[in-house]
Amino acid sequence: MVPARAIALARANAGAIWLLGATTVANVLAYGYQVIMARLLRPEDYAILTAFFAVLILEQLGGQVIQSATAKLVAQYRARDEEPALHVFVRRWLRRILLLGGAPAAAVVALSFLVRVEPLSPFAVGTLGATLFLAILLTFTLGLLQGLARFFWFGTLFIVIALTRLAVGVGLVLWLTSSPVPAGPPVNGAFLGAAFALLVGAVGALIPLAPLLGSARGAVHEVDLGKAETRFFLLAAVIFFGYASLTFVDGLIAPWRIPAEAGAYAAAITMGKIVLFAPIAVGLILLERTSRADALGHDPDKYLWAALAFVLVTSGIVALAYLVAPEALTDLVVGPQYPLTRSILGLYGLAALSNALLSLWVSYFVGRGRMVIGPLLALAVVAEIILLLTVARDALSMARIVLGVSVAMQAAAVAIYLAERLRRASLRR
């Protein structure tokens, strides 16, 4: 009886299980890309690449505003069988997304010809403009897949994007390094590979969504939900831009603030990504499950606790390993050319673990439409930037600041949750 129940449960959650496995594969490929680049590029070029990826990840995580808000609303419409409202939402917001991504992307590309943005080259800045448009479009389509629980396609796209970035980026870097004819610095190959991977992902996401996009053309609905949807998007923007900034602003500031130690700090960030990004699929599933349960009036807290426990165990093991054996793991992953990384790895691993857990709280609150955490995240970002610019003097002090701010936000999230539980308990009496 138990095996039959287990098989039925596995079949019902096959998409979610595939997403967990696929994101693991994608994370290994993405991490392999970072490790290979750390060995192919000079430390100063690798620091610039890390700053580039800090901006790119800010674009992508900032794009989680679109992805997560889209997933929340789509899951809500799907749970309530509101197909007309879903079609109108897709038609209306696809048009807005194209406008929202196109204008700033064109402005960034134009900026690359007019203003020098150290330490990024004009080519890197122009590439960021192209990736901005692709990232916004991709996050909207991924949000549709997430809200529809199309986890098989979602996970497959993760693998395709990571594999494309690895193959194209490394191939271009090697070509630029060995080319007898000067064709630009090798780091430009890494920039171009990242942009091409986003293009492949954006085009690939349109394949499973073709029927939905076709139904959405010309769709009308008697109830105008535009204002409510816009308000939710704006509130989600505060939350996800806040979280994105909180977790990656240090990588952007390091080349300016601590140039002598920026390479070592970039290596610590690279290793911290194992802890931070390993549970990404858990957050994606948590948001969809929470949104659906909340729309149906069910209690979604069981999903939250399962997600927190899973991440605490999996990412926690890696963070513990960083504390126990920083020297061996640093030399193994990024190589012996970053000796200073060994002294900050354990601390940065704890900061990455705290931020990984914080991402689950963010997914839970957004899934339930509880947006009070947004202003607190905004304040935390301001505090972190001020501390990094005024207090940080070296890589170790930067890691301490990141950890301290993250732990404070973790405590704030728990306090918000407990207050909400007490409010719900009092309403039931």
Image (tube, rainbow, N blue to C red):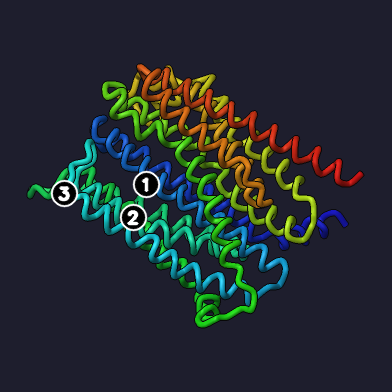
What residue appears at the point 42 percent right and 18 percent down from the top-left corner? 397
The three-letter amino acid code for the residue at tag 1 is Leu
Residue linked to disc 2: 131
Is residue 385 positioned above or below 146 on the image? above
Q: Report, in whole angstroms, how far the alpha carbon at label 3 lies from the one at label 1.
A: 21 Å
Is residue 320 positioned above or below 179 on the image? above
Report the mark closest to the observer, 3 or 1.
3
| Quarter where residue 230 is shown | bottom right
Q: Give me the disc on residue 56.
A: 1
Could you say whether the residue bearing mark 2 is in a helix, strand or loop? helix
3 and 2 marks in contact (CB < 8 Å): no
| Quarter where residue 278 is shown | top right
Crowding near the residue tagged with mark 1, few <14, some 14–19, many ≥20 C-alpha atoms within 10 Å: many
Is residue 76 positioned above or below 174 on the image? below
2 and 1 marks in contact (CB < 8 Å): yes
Could you say whether the residue bearing mark 3 is in a helix, strand or loop? helix
The three-letter amino acid code for the residue at tag 2 is Thr
x and y percentages locating residue 31 in the rendered image: 42, 41
Q: Give me the disc on residue 114.
A: 3
Looking at the image, the residue that sits furthest to the left is 181
Could you say whether the residue bearing mark 1 is in a helix, strand or loop? helix
Is residue 20 positioned above or below 421 on the image? below
Q: Report, in whole angstroms, how far the alpha carbon at label 3 lies from the one at label 2.
A: 19 Å
Q: Report, in whole angstroms, how far the alpha carbon at label 2 lies from the one at label 1.
A: 7 Å
Q: Quadrant of the N terminus?
A: bottom right
Closer-to-camera residue (52/421)? 421
In the displayed structure, does residue 41 sit left or right of residue 297? left
The three-letter amino acid code for the residue at tag 3 is Leu
Label 2 vs 1, first from the N-terminus: 1
Label 3 vs 1, first from the N-terminus: 1
